[in-house]
Amino acid sequence: MSALPAGTAAPAISLASESDQQLSLADALRHGPVLAAFFKVNCPTCQFTFPFLERLREAYAGPNFTIWGVSQNDAVDTRAFLGEFGVKFPALIDAQGYAVSKQYRLTNVPTLFLIAPDGKIQITSVGFAKADLEKIAAEAARLTGKPAKPLFRSGEVVPAYKPG
């Protein structure tokens, strides 16, 4: 079994965030695409990936592009993770039984799903994949109409892939 592939209908998500705000995928998709990034706080590859996702948020998030973390930990640990890694986008809590993670057929974290407004998964990325993040950034720029910005900085040593 592997994570749901591109082209698949995204299962519903309706979870409380780390700040106890109820969020739903259906509501968010009314405004534009959603990047859902599933993670665990103690996952080294998640810790490496999330600052780059924060760069995506800084460049493209707004009323027509949403980024969410989907945490497999409790709200307290999730808030600490977000603070430690400078993440300002919300994280939904999928800790009890991992119901949403199971619907998305997660095998590893991080796993990212770029979900189009029609509810179909546009990009699935497992682990840290530099090329996938660049595709997600390009798609975010296209969908938001914002100018494309490099996700990775000159001189930064970034591997092509890190398994989750």
Image: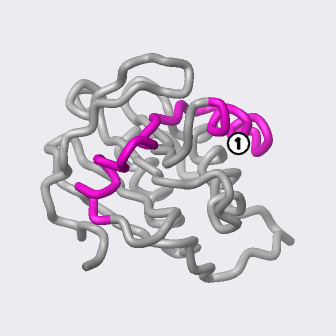
Q: Quadrant of the N terminus?
A: bottom left
Q: Residue at x 53, y 31 (%)?
A: 90
| Residue picked out by circle 1 | 81
Horizontal and vertical percent position of residue 99: 29, 47
Indicate the quadrant where residue 118 lies. top left
Asked if the stretch drawn in magenta spans residue 98, the answer is yes
Q: Position of residue 13 (x, y in %)?
A: 27, 38
The answer to whether 128 is drawn above or below residue 16 in the figure is below
Segment tinted magenta in the rendering: 76-105
Q: Position of residue 144 (x, y in %)?
A: 40, 38
In the rendered image, the vertical position of residue 1 relative to residue 35, given as above or below: below
Q: How many marks?
A: 1
Look at the image and say whether residue 149 sits in the magenta stretch.
Answer: no
In the image: residue 34, left or right of residue 148: left
Residue at point 24%, 70% (across, down): 5
Horizontal side of residue 109 vs 22, given as left or right: right
Q: Residue at x 52, y 63 (%)?
A: 110
Secondary structure of residue under mark 1: helix
Q: Alpha-carbon neighbours of circle 1 within 10 Å: few (<14), some, or many (≥20)?
A: some
Q: Nearer the viewer, residue 26 or 135?
A: 26
Q: Quadrant of residue 29?
A: top left
Can you say whether 94 is above or below 136 in the image?
above
**Residue positioned most to the right:** 155
The residue sitting at the front extreme is 97
Residue type (three-letter) at the residue carrying disc 1: Phe
Which quarter shows the C terminus? bottom right
